[in-house]
């Protein structure tokens, strides 16, 4: 009974929640991409510092990733290909969580470089918990958008 | 009425949707490709004297000396300023006495003002005063990065404070003679997996960031152990 009431209330606002989720996830992706795209050398350094990929590959990812983030973010804000963008956006967040976790587990001291910056930092100057919590919240938004891609003011119909 | 309107909009909206997706994909592809290409090393460009391509385009002192010490830094990096305060005098002594081959890689990943500063450093090297300029730069390092303080006129003043009287220095700074060269320094550091500044390699091996950078005794020992007299 309570469940049904919740479901009804949710459906009443679902279009607006989808819009909000699109704007938050999309806005964060655009900001993250734009801040990094302006300084590709630092973005590449940030990716290298995770010490997962071979250096050449890490550099290419560092140069290219900010543009992908901006593209996905833009699609979400405009409201086109929301389902696909949610899959890519959520996938990126899961990758980021994995990358940050492995750095933490291996005892590396790095800045995630999520919004520009990045690279090795002094031990004790890491912020792994906050970074992972933030990306987990954004993953939840992506999951919601995957389930409910249609909302207010979107081009998708 | 409302449903009619929706129906008549559908094909147009579908075309619009495809167009928007296409544009986004296009911008992402072009931007990403441009970013990858424009951050590669430039093949032919104007190099400062005492720069060696074989040494990652760094500014080289005592090219035949041994051991080899590589220092990656950014003139705007506050930890580099601390490092300079702790080990700068010793490094300068080693350079001047010719007790090692020392290569300075002035990176510029902190931002546009680092590019201007690195260019000016190369100009100073061309005027034979890199070490003096280097010291003056850190003595006057602005407290915030990219705050608008580091400009070409400001860098010219730093050069004057470092004792550079060569008239070519200010034109070199103002014309940005070695702006392109700063890209090659970055590309080489990227290829060598340098992920922080300062980074010091002795004979190609990185010092231990936790113990050997900020302790002058440990730093000196690392160098003397490698053969610095």
Image (spheres, rainbow, N blue to C red):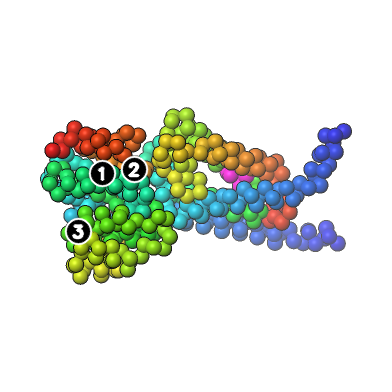
- Is residue B157 depicted above or below B104 in this figure? below
Secondary structure state at the residue bearing disc 2: loop
Secondary structure state at the residue bearing disc 1: helix
Choose mark 2 or mark 3, whichever is in front: 3
Question: Residue B45 appears in which quarter of the rendering?
Answer: bottom left
The chain identifier of the residue carrying mark 3 reads: B
Secondary structure state at the residue bearing disc 3: loop
Question: What span is colored magenta in the figure?
Answer: A85-90
The verdict on a common chain for dots 3 and 1 is yes
Question: Residue B139 appears in which quarter of the rendering?
Answer: bottom left
Answer with left or right where residue B182 lies relative to residue A91.
left
Question: Residue B13 appears in which quarter of the rendering?
Answer: bottom right
Give whichever of discs 1 and 2 has the lower sequence position. Answer: 1
| Picture coordinates of residue A147, whole percent (x, y) | 70, 41
Which of the labelled discs sits on residue B87, or is there none?
Answer: 1
Report the Cα–Cα distance between label 1 and label 2: 20 Å
Q: Report the residue marked by disc 3.
A: B129
The verdict on a common chain for dots 1 and 2 is yes
At x 25% / y 63%, what residue is drawn?
B161
- Is residue B227 depicted above or below B91 in this figure? above
Answer with left or right where residue B194 lies relative to residue A82.
left
Q: Report the residue marked by disc 2.
A: B194
Which of B150 and B18 lies nearest the eye of the viewer? B150
Asked if the stretch drawn in magenta spans residue A86, the answer is yes
């Amino acid at each position: 009974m309570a469940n049904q009431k919740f479901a009804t209330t949710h459906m009443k606002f679902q279009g607006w929640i989808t819009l909000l989720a699109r704007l938050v996830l999309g806005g964060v992706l655009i900001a993250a991409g734009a801040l990094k795209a302006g300084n590709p050398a630092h973005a590449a350094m940030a990716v290298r510092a995770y010490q997962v990929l071979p250096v050449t590959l890490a550099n290419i990812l560092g140069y290219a990733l900010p543009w992908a983030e901006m593209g996905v973010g833009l699609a979400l804000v405009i409201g086109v290909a929301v389902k696909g963008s949610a899959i890519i956006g959520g996938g990126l967040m899961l990758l980021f969580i994995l990358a940050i976790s492995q750095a933490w587990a291996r005892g590396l001291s790095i800045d995630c470089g999520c919004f520009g910056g990045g690279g090795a930092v002094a031990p004790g100057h890491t912020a792994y918990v906050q970074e992972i919590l933030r990306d987990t919240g954004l993953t939840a938004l992506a999951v919601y958008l995957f389930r409910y891609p249609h909302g207010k003011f979107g081009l998708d119909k | 009425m409302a449903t009619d309107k929706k129906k008549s909009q559908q094909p147009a909206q579908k075309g619009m949707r495809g167009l928007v997706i296409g544009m986004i994909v296009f911008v992402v592809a072009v931007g990403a490709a441009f970013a990858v290409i424009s951050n590669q090393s430039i093949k032919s460009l104007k190099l400062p004297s005492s720069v060696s391509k074989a040494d990652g385009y760094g500014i080289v002192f005592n090219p035949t000396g041994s051991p080899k010490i590589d220092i990656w830094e950014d003139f705007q990096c506050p930890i580099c300023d601390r490092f300079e305060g702790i080990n700068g005098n010793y490094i300068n002594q080693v350079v001047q006495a010719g007790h090692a081959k020392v290569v300075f890689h002035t990176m510029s990943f902190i931002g546009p003002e680092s590019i201007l500063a690195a260019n000016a450093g190369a100009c100073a090297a061309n005027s034979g005063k890199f070490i003096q300029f280097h010291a003056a730069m850190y003595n006057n390092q602005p407290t915030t990065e990219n705050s608008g303080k580091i400009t070409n006129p400001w860098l010219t003043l730093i050069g004057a404070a470092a004792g550079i009287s060569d008239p070519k220095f200010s034109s070199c700074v103002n014309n940005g003679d070695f702006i392109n060269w700063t890209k090659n320094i970055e590309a080489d550091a990227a290829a060598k997996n340098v992920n922080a500044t300062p980074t010091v390699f002795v004979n190609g091996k990185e010092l231990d960031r936790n113990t050997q950078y900020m302790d002058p005794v440990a730093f000196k020992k690392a160098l003397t152990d490698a053969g610095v007299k």
